[in-house]
Amino acid sequence: MARSAALVTAAVAALLGVPAVAAADAPWSPPAAVSGTSGFPGGLWTTAAGHSGVVAPEPGVGGTVVGALAPDAAVARREVVPLVAPRVAAYAKDHVALLGSTRDDEGTIGGPGGSVVIALGTGTGAFGRLRTLTSAPDSFPMGLATDAHGDVAAVVASGRTRTVYLRRAGTVAFKVALRFTLSTLGRDAAVAVGRKGDLLVVWEDRHVISARHVGATGHSGPVHRIGDGVQSTLRPLVDDDTGRLSVAWETQRVAEGDAGTPATYRFSTAAPGHGFGPQHTVSVVTPTGTGREVSPPALRLLPDGTGRALRAFVGYGGGHYVVRALEVDQGHLGAPRTLSSPSEDSVLADAATDGAGRAVVAWRTGVAGAEPSAGSGSTSPPEVLTAAVRAPGATAFGPGERISDPAAKDVTDAYVTLTPRAVIATWGTVETLAEVRLASRPLG
């Protein structure tokens, strides 16, 4: 295992091409900059074959840098894909989908002349041509979902219209699986893909959360009203083992940086062949006011490969924002466990599972909702990326491990992924034009 850790660290260094900076907590490698990038990362991927990579923006108004680690952890592949605002997901055995937008002639996203596009590639980072999903004005991607069989689904907003595009495994073209129009109060929409190629589509409109199931044959079921929400963040899930449908969401009214209501976390689920049950309130984060909204991603809902799911979210207790996780088993919510320190503010950064029961949850310490925590005098505590790992078969996570350098600028937009041998994390900083950071940790 020590040799595997060294190989992963060497691969990271080869990809970055620059010396590492200040050390993190053992066993994490020192954070290092991803050369030729700027701003905030777009994500990480790990395929079922074990290939992983990082997605990050080029400086200025360029494209997206895709850096992949080779199977032998010795050679890096790097290319630039001409899209921006990327979303990335692995699918099938060893493929990757990259969803994003092209800019219009004035350099803006979603304007006339711009398009929502998708590129399909391999786990080793070789991507094909861009495929245009739509060039309608005011269009932008809202969600990307894939499955192990090879299906790829994307949700695109075009004004008030939401369109779900689907490419079936073994086919080439993306086709419209579902299209619907919302009112002027319409908000987020998201999609999940099941192992059989069925879809769960969820959206918010007129402060109502609705869901619709699209079967593997393309037949769309009825619309289900599953709960209430305002400016909600939606996380749908189709259980591959049982076919159970679940939706987790966070709802909070925010206006110009002011949290007008507490952040409320809810959950609803439907057994196969049945309708959704009543919504359950899982957590309430009570602070309101300027900068007290819960910053994205707010929550994650992920299958862990054992017939259960991991739900990671933000809670509040003892005067602090905290990060918690619980297990969802056949629609039943387990007891939440607080992963971050109860004596300091933290918000969720990301979470990942590997299909074998292993999980990692990452959070940003020193953040009270969306702004830095109050410190002593005029000094705020540093914002530090921290993560905890759960081993396969375990019920509890290990202690939090610092990933980023507390002396560096504040952490934003972080992602984690699990490879067969390591955890990899990437993040951005508030520092102007700073390069994206990357670090790895061997698995015991």
Image (cartoon, rainbow, N blue to C red):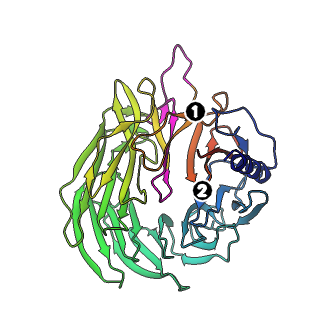
Magenta-drawn stretch contains 380: yes
Q: Secondary structure at mark 1?
A: strand
Residue 130 appears at what percent x and percent y? 64, 75
Identify the residue at horizontal 69%, vertical 40% (top origin).
Answer: 29
Q: Do the residues under discs 2 and 1 have CB atoms within 8 angstroms?
A: no
Farthest-out residue, top? 377
Magenta-drawn stretch contains 76: no
Task: Please determine whether, in this image, residue 286 is positioned above or below residue 265.
Answer: above
Task: Please determine whether, in this image, residue 180 is positioned above or below residue 293.
Answer: below
In-image side of 380 versus 337 (left or right): right
Q: Is residue 259 visible?
A: no
Q: Sequence order check: which comes first, mark 2 or mark 1? A: 1
- Work out whether residue 48 or residue 99 is closer to the camera in this orientation and state it: 48
Look at label 2 and name its amino acid: Pro
Q: Which residue is mark 2?
A: 420
Q: Which mark is residue 384?
A: 1
Quadrant that contains the C terminus: top right
Look at label 1 and name its amino acid: Val
Identify the residue at horizontal 70%, vertical 32% (top origin).
Answer: 23
Q: CA distance from mark 2 to mark 1?
A: 26 Å
Task: Please determine whether, in this image, residue 390 is positioned above or below residue 321.
Answer: below
Q: Between tags 2 and 1, which lies in front?
A: 2
The stretch in magenta equals 352-381
Residue 144 appears at what percent x and percent y? 49, 66
